[in-house]
Amino acid sequence: MAETRHTSVLIIGSGPAGYTAGVYASRAMLSPILVQGIEPGGQLTTTTEVENWPGLTEVQGPDLMIQMEAHAKAMGCEIIGDIIMSLDTTARPFTAIGDSGTIYTADAVILATGARAKWLGLPSEDAYKGFGVSACATCDGFFYRGQEIVVIGGGNTAVEEALFLTNFASKVTLIHRRDELRAEKILIDRLMKNPKIEPLWFHQLDEVVGEDNPKGVTAVRVKHVKTGEITEIPCKGVFVAIGHAPANELVKDVLELHNGGYVTVKPGSTETSIPGIFAAGDLTDHKYRQAVTSAGMGCMAALDAERFIAENAV
Ligand SMILES: Cc1cc2nc3c(=O)[nH]c(=O)nc-3n(C[C@H](O)[C@H](O)[C@H](O)COP(=O)(O)OP(=O)(O)OC[C@H]3O[C@@H](n4cnc5c(N)ncnc54)[C@H](O)[C@@H]3O)c2cc1C
């Protein structure tokens, strides 16, 4: 028979938002349960150096997430290796069902399921992820000071990333399949006026070229979409900027969403459109998408949940 577990606060997701919510909810004596999902530790487990987590000049992403998990556990958060397959938000306590068959009931739920960068799906792109291939200019731009880099994409994300990367790179080549950009006009104007950026129209990424010792990118091969002609462009960094997809599967039909699927929260809080359901981290945030901002929202969500539980005690 399926086991049923009740908790005051169910935290769904084990990235910086989830673990920080775990620390705060535990210290508020709420005995939270945190369900880790398919990627324990979240997106930072897929990267190498992190240089913008305050207090640590440099830390490996997976190590940082092990420390966060240990911190949440030490404060009393129960951490469970399971995946939430469904969430019933129509009645309180809320009911979530895990892939293990366990039924979780909770007075409040903190959604911290994050987001995924979209990738092109090329084997060479995968091989050099974290070694020259990135989907986050804010995170990794600093590593390419004085280097030539390429940005793939033609929407707002790509234009913003290309502009931001000119703070570091000696040259940014923007590679796009068409000959016009799908971005805000003001951004396109800025891009076109920037002497460091060179758009390459009608091309798509065919292969990332690199070496293994030390592992890193040396060039990209790009293909002309009409003629099929291949050109090699020397570069040290490849930024794939074709958008992000928030992991909203559990709530996309019941919660208010914005910007193509991010969960909407009330300004200055983590309250969603359903009282008692809170959201934190990249799942709600199409703009900043950082570990530290996610952790900040995880803190807010635990404090919001604590207040909600106190005000709605039966
Ligand atoms: C390659 C890379 C490098 C990066 N480098 C940096 C950096 O240097 N600095 C920085 O600040 N940021 C960096 N980021 C961004 C940072 O990782 C994210 O902003 C941050 O991880 C978001 O945290 P989060 O807690 O919202 O969600 P995520 O880290 O996305 O975690 C989501 C969690 O939800 C879980 N989950 C999803 N669905 C379910 C479900 N149904 N049931 C249970 N659990 C579920 C997943 O298993 C995962 O644990 C990087 C991102 C990437 C991809």
Image (cartoon, rainbow, N blue to C red):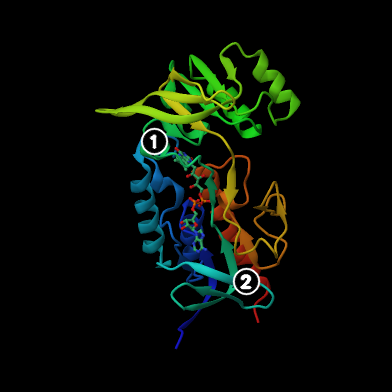
Q: Position of residue 155 (x, y in %)?
A: 65, 33
* View extreme (top): residue: 195
Camera-side residue: 310 or 284? 284
Label 1 sits on residue: 124
Camera-side residue: 312 or 211? 211
At label 1, counting other C-alpha atoms closer than 10 Å, the crowd grade (few under 14, some 14-19, many 20 or more) is some
* View extreme (left): residue: 213
Q: Position of residue 303 (x, y in %)?
A: 59, 60
Question: Which amino acid, mark 1?
Answer: Ser
Q: How many marks?
A: 2
Camera-side residue: 314 or 95? 95
Question: Which amino acid, mark 2?
Answer: Ile
Question: Is the residue 1 above or below the residue 270 in the image?
Answer: below
Q: Secondary structure at mark 1?
A: helix
First along the sequence among labels 2 and 1 = 1
The quadrant the N terminus occupies is bottom left
Q: Residue at x 61, y 21 (%)?
A: 201
Residues under numbered marks 2 and 1 in contact, where contact means CB atoms less than 8 Å apart: no
Label 2 sits on residue: 309
The quadrant the C terminus occupies is bottom right
Question: Is the residue 61 above or below the residue 279 in the image?
Answer: above
User: Seen in the image, is 50 located left or right of residue 175?
Assistant: left
Q: Position of residue 85 (x, y in %)?
A: 53, 69
Q: Quadrant of residue 158?
A: top right
Q: Residue at x 62, y 46 (%)?
A: 285
Q: Residue at x 68, y 19 (%)?
A: 190
Question: Is the residue 108 above or below the residue 181 in the image?
Answer: below
